[in-house]
Image (cartoon, rainbow, N blue to C red):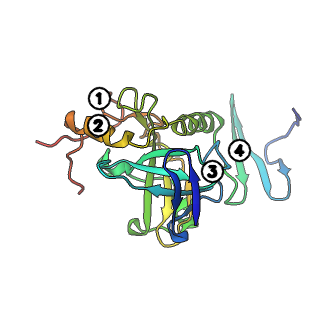
Amino acid sequence: MKIATTRFGALEVPEQALITLPCGLIGLGHVTRLVFVDQEDAGWFRWWQAVDHPEIAFVTIDPSRLVEEYALAGVDEDLRALGVGDASMRMVIALTSLPQGTLDGATVNLLAPIVVNRATGQGRQVVLPDGRYSVAHPLDGTVSGTRAVEMAA
Amino acid sequence: MLVLTRRVEEGIVIGDDVRVRVLEIKGHQVKLGIDAPRTTGVYREEIYRRIQEENRQAAHVPEHPGMLSSLWREWRSRGLGERKKP
């Protein structure tokens, strides 16, 4: 299918690449269909483009890149509803906020990741209840609170 | 705002499929039980608002498609991006 985007122009995406969030994102209930747009040299960061809203795209990262043993604790009912009890069946997506488009002031939402069933493409934004993770974890890990990025030797 | 007075063990029904019940009252705390369909999100209000705010900020990324390569360069130049996945 063809989708319009303000950043990437018109994109041709296969239907099976769509991720569907029947409930939308929290506070953005109209954002229900998204697709990843991969770019060279973007490393761990991936654009996640809203299919029905050309101007909406998120910068995402796999939270397990940032926090060791990132755990989806206390959301068993959500995981069951999605049919992703086993970690291999799911994809976990964290949304970043990049107010400057750089690492300055950049944060990542580790409290409310989006969990997606890899087989069906259906997902939902879940809220981790145990208070271990922040809604605005500094992306460069310099502020204490949750565990910072482990750096290479 | 509709205001209703309820006792412990009493509840209210919202629409056809949401039920809220007062389970316990202790001092200034009220324990509520909520039955709602899985597609209905149920959140503590302050958490809902914070996530809503954060999602809306996350949706306001600069309109610059090449931004991620410079972000990744910056990330690597700060020595942040080298951890191997377990």
Q: Are marks 1 and 4 in contact (CB under 8 Å)?
A: no
Instruction: Classify mark 3: helix, strand or loop.
Output: loop
Nearest to N terminus: mark 2 or mark 1: 1
Q: Disc 3 to disc 4, how far (Cα)?
A: 30 Å
Residue A140 placement, left or right of A105: left
For the residue pair A51 and B12, the one nearer the viewer reads as: A51
Q: CA distance from mark 1 to mark 4?
A: 39 Å
- Tell me the amino acid under the disc marked 4: Leu
Amino acid identity at mark 2: Ala
Q: On the image, numbered disc 2 is attached to which residue? A: A148
Discs 3, 2 touching: Cβ within 8 Å: no
Q: Relative to residue A139, is residue A2 drawn left or right?
A: right
Gap in angstroms between the C-alphas marked 4 and 2: 36 Å
Q: Do the residues under discs 2 and 1 have CB atoms within 8 angstroms? A: yes
What's the chain of the residue with tag 2?
A
Please give the residue where the numbered disc 4 appears in the rendered image: B32
Q: Which residue is mark 1?
A: A142
Tell me the element at label 2: loop
* Residue type, numbered disc 3: Val
Q: Determine if marks 3 and 4 fall on one subunit.
A: no
Q: Which residue has dot 3 on it?
A: A31
Q: Residue at x 86, y 53 (%)?
A: B15
Relative height, residue A57 to residue A1 (above, below):
above
**Disc 1 on helix, strand or loop?**
loop
Label 3 or label 2, whichever comes before in sequence order:
3
Residue at image location 49% in from the left, 37% down from the top: B63
**Chain letter for the residue marked with disc 1 in the picture:** A
User: Residue A120: horizontal and vertical position, in percent?
Assistant: 53, 71
